[in-house]
């Protein structure tokens, strides 16, 4: 599986995810610009993960740009579940919103679904 990650500041989560990806032979690619997605347009089993905490001031724009550049599943990850943030993120186009720890614990299941 290819995981395209939009993360800026949660280094601990990034390190844990990188370790899991290494063990599972998955690709973890950190991206900072939407136009970089074109490199991965032909890849199967690709998901996008976004740190909602990092991008909360530009989520609308980011989601719109991502949807224009592909049809990857988009996972919004947050440190602590907040129902208002979850509702908003789902409304603007995230496929799934979950905590970062939940994502790490369920990555094998997510991998099977994609």
Image: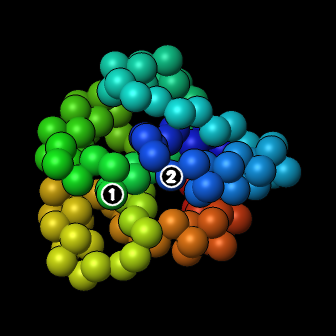
In depth, the one of 7 and 93 nearer the eye is 7
Q: Nearer the viewer, residue 85 or 72?
A: 85
Disc 2 to disc 1, how far (Cα)? Answer: 9 Å
Say above or below: 26 vs 106.
above
According to the picture, the residue beneath numbered tag 2 turns out to be 10
Q: Secondary structure at mark 2?
A: loop
Foreground residue among 49 and 56: 56
Is residue 36 placed above or below 13 in the rendered structure? Answer: above
Q: Position of residue 47 (x, y in %)?
A: 50, 46
* Disc number placed over residue 53 in the picture, else none: 1
- x%, y% of residue 13? 59, 57
Image location of residue 45, percent across then percent down:
59, 43
Q: Residue furthest right?
A: 23
Horizontal side of 13 relative to 96 (left or right) equals right
Horizontal side of 88 relative to 51 (left or right) equals left
Position of the C terminus, as image quadrant, is bottom right
Whichever of callouts 2 and 1 sits on the residue coming sooner in the sequence is 2
Please report the residue visible at 40 percent of the width from the left and 28 percent of the height from the top: 32
The secondary element bearing badge 1 is classed as helix
């Amino acid at each position: 599986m290819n995981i395209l990650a939009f993360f800026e500041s949660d280094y601990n989560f990034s390190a844990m995810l990188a370790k899991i990806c290494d063990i599972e032979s998955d690709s973890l690619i950190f991206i900072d610009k939407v136009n970089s997605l074109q490199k991965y347009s032909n890849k199967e089993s690709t998901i996008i993960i976004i740190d909602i905490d990092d991008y909360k001031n530009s989520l609308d724009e980011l989601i719109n740009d991502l949807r224009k550049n592909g049809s990857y599943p988009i996972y919004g990850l947050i440190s602590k579940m907040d129902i208002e943030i979850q509702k908003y993120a789902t409304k603007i186009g995230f496929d799934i919103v979950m905590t970062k720890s939940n994502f790490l614990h369920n990555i094998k299941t997510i991998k099977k679904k994609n």
